[in-house]
């Protein structure tokens, strides 16, 4: 029985590994509720929402459960679509961005706590021969600096804008006699004023330790929810934009879901069927003339090798099988 149970677990693990990784994107976290705390720490406003998102991407990539879209692709979409930072926590807007990126889900989140929770303890005044009583000191105070960070995230379906999963992360770090940006006893040590949360200097600070703990916990929660993401069939619809021998360039790329190794049909329109009442085209009749195997991909185009009974032409349609 033990061997059968172990075999079942092994087969389940192999099946999970055989499944393609789900593709996700992470938007900058909303940090409106902690903006004053952030300004108190650095002396000025810092976009810690961007920093948390960058660190979460790093953790998810290291975890290997998801394929994660690069920040450059997201920033380009945000600029092209004129989305503002206030849109980062809106599920409907996030889903729209995710559809453009061609991801299975998009992760949005917020920072609910980011700052200090210090404690001051008094070493009693009775232990110094009455000196403290005489001068009204009441004892010696020792302060412990403590950083507390909490983050939460939602994984949004790009098809329906529904919440597929939620995650939460909390982190604390405390040391005696140090500031939140100090790496040791000195408040100026170890990356003071830094806000690149993926840097080693920031990780060595008190607030950095708390951030890393919170984001690590959050990434584990999101990875555990991978099975909740429905399989999303990507349908490629593009055109051949250039032909040179058997090498073709398509007008669609990774943003549309094209990947290196994809085999796509090349189809040519032979006639149109029109509605006799309105004259509008109701169907295009196409012939499959060949197949293209993708060899290179960027965001908006792809290069492939064409094989078919007749040469490919500019304007031929390229579609998923």
Image (cartoon, helix red, strand yellow):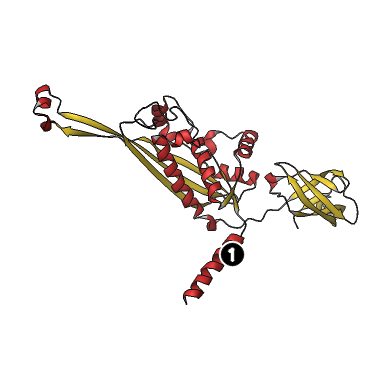
Q: Residue 149: x, y in percent?
A: 39, 40
> Left or right of 302: which side holds 198?
left
Along the viewing direction, whichever of 161 and 204 lies nearer the viewer: 204
- Name which quarter of the figure residue 191 lies in: top left
> Left or right of 119: which side holds 65?
right
Does 88 appear above or below 269? above
Q: Residue at x 51, y 68 (%)?
A: 9
> Left or right of 265: which side holds 133?
left
Q: Residue 182: x, y in percent?
A: 38, 30
Residue under label 1: 15
Q: Residue at x 54, y 40 (%)?
A: 27
Q: Residue 291: x, y in percent?
A: 82, 55
Q: Residue furthest right?
A: 310
Is residue 271 among the parts visible in the rendering? no
Along the viewing direction, whichever of 44 and 274 lies nearer the viewer: 44
Neighbor class of circle 1 (other Cα within 10 Å; few <14, some 14-19, many 20+) is few
Q: Residue at x 61, y 44 (%)?
A: 69
Is residue 38 among the parts visible in the rendering? yes
> Left or right of 270: which side holds 206?
left
């Amino acid at each position: 029985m033990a061997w059968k149970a172990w075999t079942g677990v092994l087969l389940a693990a192999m099946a999970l590994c055989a499944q393609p990784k789900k593709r996700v994107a992470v938007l900058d976290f909303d940090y409106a509720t902690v903006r004053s705390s952030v300004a108190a720490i650095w002396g000025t406003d810092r976009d810690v929402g961007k920093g948390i998102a960058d660190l979460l991407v790093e953790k998810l990539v290291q975890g290997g459960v998801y394929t994660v879209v690069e920040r450059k692709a997201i920033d380009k979409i945000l600029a092209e679509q004129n989305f503002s930072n206030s849109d980062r926590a809106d599920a409907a807007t996030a889903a729209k961005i995710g559809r453009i990126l061609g991801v299975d889900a998009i992760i949005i989140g917020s920072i609910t706590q980011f700052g200090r929770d210090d404690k001051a303890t008094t070493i009693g005044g009775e232990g110094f021969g009455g000196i403290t009583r005489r001068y009204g000191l009441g004892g010696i105070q020792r302060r412990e600096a403590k950083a507390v960070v909490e983050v939460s995230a939602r994984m949004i379906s790009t098809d329906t804008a529904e919440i597929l999963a939620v995650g939460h992360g909390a982190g604390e770090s405390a040391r005696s006699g140090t500031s939140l940006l100090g790496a040791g006893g000195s408040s100026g040590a170890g990356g003071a004023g830094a806000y690149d949360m993926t840097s080693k200097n920031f990780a060595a600070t008190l607030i950095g330790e708390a951030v890393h703990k919170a984001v690590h916990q959050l990434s584990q929660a999101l990875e555990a929810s991978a099975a909740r993401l429905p399989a999303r069939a990507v349908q490629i619809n593009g055109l051949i934009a250039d032909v040179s021998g058997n090498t073709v360039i398509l007008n669609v790329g990774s943003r549309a879901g094209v990947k290196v190794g994809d085999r796509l049909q090349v189809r040519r329109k032979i006639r149109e069927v029109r509605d006799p009442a309105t004259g509008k085209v109701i169907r295009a009749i196409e012939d499959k003339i060949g197949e293209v195997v993708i060899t290179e991909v960027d965001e908006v185009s792809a290069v492939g090798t064409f094989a078919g009974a007749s040469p490919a032409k500019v304007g031929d349609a390229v579609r998923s099988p």
